Amino acid sequence: MTPEANILYQQACTLEYQKDLQGAANKILEALKLSGDEPMLYTKLAGIYSDMFKFEEAVAAYEKVIELRPNDAFVFISLGNIYETSGQYQKALDAYTNALKIFPEYKFNYFNIANVQYQLKDYKNAIENYNMFLGTYAQHNDARRNLAGTYLADNNPEKAASEYEIIYNKNPQTFEDFVKYGTALFEIKNYYKASEMLQKAVEKDPENTAVHVSLALSYQELEKNQLAQAQYEIVFQQKPNLHSLRFDYGNLLADMEKNTEALEQYKKYIEFYPKDGRAYKNSGLIYKRLKNYESAVENYEKAIALNTVDADLKKDLANCYHMLKDYPNAIKYYDEVLAVDKNDYDVKVNKGIALHAMQKYEDAIRIYNDVLTVQASDVVENNLTEALIAQGHEDLKLQNYSKATDEFIKAISRGTKDSYAYFGLAKAYRACDINDKATEYYEKAIAMDPENTLYSEDFAEFISETAPSQNIEEQAASMSGELPAVVIGDNISQDNIKKVNDFIAAGDENYKQKNYEASIKNYREALNINPSDEVTLLKIGNIYKIQNDETNAIDFYKKAIFVNPSYADGWFNLGLVYASQQDVKGSKKCFERVLSINPQYAYAYYALGLAYETEENKDEAVKNYNQFVKYTDDTKTAEEVLNKIKKLQK
């Protein structure tokens, strides 16, 4: 460079320092007239033009430098910076790559390359180069942030979350990427930590609807329903037309048992997404819960039209048709489910019940026998017995006496207490002229149900047929009230009552002495005579509960409520066992059943309050605790509950 050009160069540097960029550029241009092959002058000119945002002129100057000094890696890096700043990412990448070839030891260039590769959506190579850079500059915060963002863009949220965690833990006070960090955590289903980060994100940017959405969904996954609902409300305030989210919001409201509100959200969603069968299915679930089976069927049918392979949906639809007593349609869908899974126990049982209701007893009997080879069930056992009795009477009408006899005998051998089976067997034997057997079973039927005049009248007719020598007056005398009194049933019944009471008294005494096995034996002996005594069944269940044998306790509580579906104590004790097993949903159903039977059953309200408190549903917990206080006579517990209510309402 000539002395004159050097003076101009120094003057340009001074003007540049004084922010007179145009003046500085003019001085360099004058110097180039004197020393046109000086790379330093072109380098300075390119830098000044770059600061003036005259990128084309800057590029031209750098290209001149490259002609004069082709192995200067930093010129390529400067050229790359201009291209990157002006959004010409491919040209920037080419420039940075040339610099890398010339000077591979300059690790900072990996950061430049990674940045433009990210812009070009070449995430795989960008990730590789960010990691190359961080291998040398591990504390470089911007590089790690960019790497985390690239992982997120490359659908690798787990690694993104890991990188953001490093940045956050290093300095939480200066951390800014709450949105991206929260999004990555949400994607990997770390909803607890995601909600923490997303909450910080909305505090910084409360108008960011997308963050409110992610936060709502995170709370929903954590079953923090009240918090989730609050976020959804903010979302719809900000963007009322964000209808794609209404399905998730409907699901939340359904979980909160806000059925009307949930249905409203599903309806709005369906207006814009009529081909999404999930909304119809979930609407059907709510209508089914509300026992509005017609509307449930309407929605389920629409859902199935959009998803013909959803077996669970078909089960629900079949059940709704079943509840509507539309048994043909119920069986149609039961059969479709069984075509996919022929061993579905519950569906086979329900199909048997539907066939039973349609008086297709033989088909029902086949199914009942089939399922009982797989799993024992008191309900199915009882249904099988009833179906055998019903089919027996059908065969009586058809004069299939041998078949009817077989069916009645099977029912009786199963221990049925249904006098109609004994009456049917008597008629079958009568039709086959087996008169001694007919007499035996007529007498047993009358002993079991002395008030049933049909039995007495039919037996009287049978006697008149088999005793022709007896005149009408004698027949009338024999049926005027003496015959039922003569049947041993009355005497046996009185003896049995005494035996039952003695067994129960012995069981109660053994219970007091904590001789639990002996007590159970006494109670079972009483049940052998009177199996429909729900109180004794409950007592056995209570002993098993004391012994921590919850399986047997549940079994006997269920038997008690099977015998008497309106037995509130049976439902309550069953609910307590479910609660001890952490089956909150099952326990709530039992306690709600108690209150449907006896709305003043105080401890059912208390138990429901505990269940809702477990679910963090403070409003319902308080509501039920207040009802307990209203109805209880237990003043001490009432005081404790009032204190609990105060804490919940803070």
Image: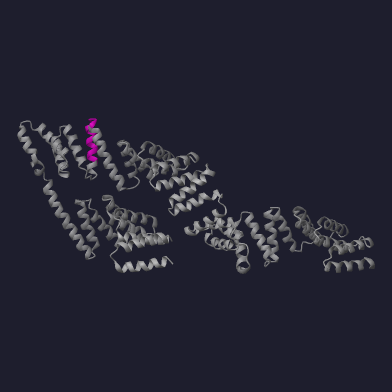
Q: Residue 451 sits in which quadrant?
A: top left
Question: Does 178 sit above or below residue 412?
Answer: below
Which quadrant is the N terminus positioned in? bottom right
- Considering only vertical position in the picture, is 396 above or below 225? above
Can you say which quadrant of the picture contains the C terminus?
Answer: bottom left
Asked if the stretch drawn in magenta spans residue 403, the answer is: yes
Q: Position of residue 324 (x, y in %)?
A: 36, 40
Helix, strand or loop for the magenta stretch, by majority: helix
Q: Nearer the viewer, residue 43 or 555?
A: 43
Q: Position of residue 184 (x, y in %)?
A: 59, 58
At x 46% / y 45%, what residue is drawn?
281
- Which corner quadrant of the image does residue 616 belong to? bottom left
Relative to 187, is 493 on the left or the right? left
Q: Is residue 264 magenta?
A: no
- Magenta range is 397-410
Q: Residue at x 25, y 39 (%)?
A: 389
Visible residue check, residue 223? no
Q: State the residue at coordinates (44%, 49%).
A: 260
